[in-house]
Image: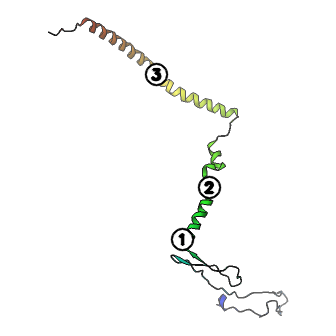
Amino acid sequence: MTSIADLEPSSTDPTAVVETSSESTPPLPNVVTSVKLELTSLPTATEKTGTISATCSTCSCIKPTPVDQNKLEESLSKLKEQLLINPKKLSSYKRALTSAPGDRQSSANIGYIGILVLCLVPGIIILLDMGRLIREFKQFIIRLRNSQRTTAKITPIERT
């Protein structure tokens, strides 16, 4: 089995058309049978100083520039400060805090039913306990009156 690296072009002229003896197969112009791949790597910055470059064999517009690590960190921090956005000033934050008006009658009715349920539940509990509350209140008043009568009858002991 042949690999892609073993294939060679059928002609050195890329525009040449090869005629075949079979009439059912049309000729294929400009067929590329091999591709040359090169693996390159970019140099990285050293710890304190170094060269950061992105070079291309066909373009000489990018030239390697020596960059100091401290200057690189300073410029990155300046860029971060410039690009930092206060999220509280965004319109999406303001829209999240404001509710849209609900002019629909069905929405209002659901709200009224919710208020009614919230008021009825504690109201029913209080009404169920109302008989006991009245009875306890009456006993409290009777005890209060009895305690006032007994304290009025008792005279303070004189000290000698």
The x, y position of residue 10, in whole percent, is 76, 93
Residue depth check, mark 1 versus mark 3: number of the one nearer the observer? 1
Q: How is the image coloured?
A: rainbow
Q: Secondary structure at mark 2?
A: loop
Query: Where 131 sits versus 41, above or below?
Result: above
**Residue nearest the viewer, comparing 104 with 77:** 77
**Residue nearest the viewer, comparing 16 with 42:** 42
**Residue nearest the viewer, comparing 62 with 146:** 62
Q: Which mark is residue 85?
A: 2
Q: In screen coordinates, is 11 left or right of 108?
A: right
The x, y position of residue 75, in whole percent, is 59, 67
Say which quarter of the image contains residue 146: top left
Q: How far apart are the two marked residues, 2 and 3, measured between alpha carbons?
A: 58 Å
**Residue nearest the viewer, comparing 65 with 154:** 65
Q: Residue at x 58, y 75 (%)?
A: 67
Q: Which mark is residue 70?
A: 1
Q: Residue at x 44, y 21 (%)?
A: 129
Q: In screen coordinates, is 122 left or right of 135?
A: right
The x, y position of residue 66, in whole percent, is 59, 78
Badge 1 vs badge 3, beta-carbon distance below 8 Å: no
Q: Can you say which quadrant of the picture contains the N terminus?
A: bottom right
Q: Which mark is residue 128?
A: 3
10 Å neighbourhood of mark 3: few (<14), some, or many (≥20)? few
Amino acid of disc 3:
Leu
Q: Secondary structure at mark 1?
A: helix
Q: Earlier in the sequence, mark 1 or mark 3?
A: 1
Q: Which mark is residue 98?
A: none
